[in-house]
Image (tube, rainbow, N blue to C red):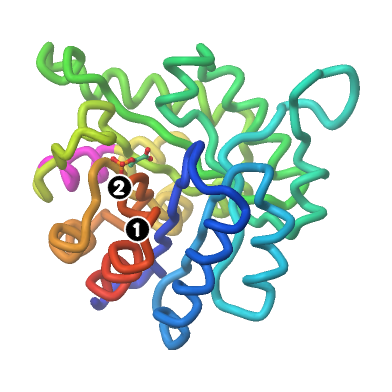
């Protein structure tokens, strides 16, 4: 696939996989994807597996991501994990503001922006998730919602940091539902996001930001989705839990 920007495909394992199961998965991915150079490949296991997975992928082209982090650097925040702690395991990416955290942990745009700033301070690239619910789409509010999330979640990010930030467009109605946005629906919102980033930062920055699509990405729809002009990768949930499906998504995207 001929693009000016390198695709980034990340697997969000969510609350799945023991350490042993995660190791099996990445060992298989290393075998299947050893020759893939065209895509930045990222796996995001639960915190409990970061240490072992980090060692397993050390000499491979697979990079490590986390699924969340604290906005604080250290201190009395029971149950939280700071960016500096993730750094110890060579975590390079962190998913922030996933719709499940927005929904179940009530994470706000303001909190996501604080976390994104803290991630950059530790040289970890945030993957900032935005996306509308079905009701919001049906009410014709997709752009309004996505714009509000972008402005709020990226507040305080410098242009330089923005170039190292990934935006994931994840329509909530497509996550884990088997319903995928059509390539045209995805492209329309991705183009809108890039236009907004142009206003918020600059055209140069907007062109360099990678915008992932997430929501029931599978081997069968990856090629067409990645073929869209403004789709620069994927954030994959369910299909990232198996060697075959995740590696086929990556191979089909090249
Ligand atoms: C996700 O949770 O980020 C996601 C896109 O999930 P799924 O691929 O299962 O829809």
Indicate whether 212 appears above or below 99. below
Outermost right residue? 75
Residue 245: x percent and y percent? 28, 63
**In the rendered structure, are the residues bearing label 1 and label 2 in contact, judged by CB atoms less than 8 Å apart?**
yes
| Residue carrying label 1 | 233
Q: Nearer the viewer, residue 201 or 13?
A: 13
Q: Is residue 58 left or right of residue 170?
A: right
Kindly identify the residue that appears in the image at 79 percent across and 26 percent down: 72
**Principal SS element in the magenta part?**
helix
Residue 173: x percent and y percent? 21, 27
Kindly identify the residue that appears in the image at 46 percent across and 82 percent down: 31
**Quarter of the rendering containing residue 251:** bottom left
Tell me if I can see residue 159 in this picture: no
In the rendered structure, which segment of residues is drawn in magenta? 185-192
**Quarter of the rendering containing residue 103:** top left
Kindly identify the residue that appears in the image at 31 percent across and 68 percent down: 244
| Residue carrying label 2 | 213
Outermost bottom residue? 35
Crowd band around label 1 with a 10 angstrom C-alpha radius: few (<14), some (14–19), many (20+): many
Q: In this view, does 161 lie to the left or right of 198?
A: right
| Element type at mark 1 | strand
């Amino acid at each position: 696939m001929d693009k000016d920007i390198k695709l980034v495909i990340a697997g969000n394992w969510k609350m799945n996989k023991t350490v042993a199961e995660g190791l099996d998965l990445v060992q298989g991915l290393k075998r299947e994807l050893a020759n893939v150079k065209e895509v930045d490949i990222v796996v995001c296991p639960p915190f409990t597996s970061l240490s072992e997975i980090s060692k397993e992928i050390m000499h491979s082209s697979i990079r490590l991501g986390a699924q969340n982090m604290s906005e604080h650097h250290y201190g009395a925040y029971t149950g939280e994990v700071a960016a500096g702690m993730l750094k110890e395991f060579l975590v390079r990416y962190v998913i922030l503001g996933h719709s499940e955290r927005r929904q179940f942990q009530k994470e706000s745009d303001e909190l996501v922006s604080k976390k994104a700033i803290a991630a950059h301070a530790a040289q970890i690239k945030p993957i900032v998730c935005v996306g509308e619910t079905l009701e919001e789409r049906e009410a014709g509010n997709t752009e309004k919602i996505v714009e509000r999330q972008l402005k709020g979640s990226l507040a305080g990010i410098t242009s330089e940091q923005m170039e190292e930030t990934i935006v994931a467009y994840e329509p909530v109605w497509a996550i884990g539902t088997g319903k995928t946005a059509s390539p045209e629906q995805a492209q329309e919102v991705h183009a809108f996001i890039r236009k907004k980033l142009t206003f918020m930062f600059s055209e140069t920055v907007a062109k360099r930001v990678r915008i992932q699509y997430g929501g029931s990405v599978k081997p069968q729809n990856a090629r067409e989705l990645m073929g869209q002009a403004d789709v620069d990768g994927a954030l994959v949930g369910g299909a990232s839990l198996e060697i075959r499906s995740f590696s086929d998504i990556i191979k089909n995207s090249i």
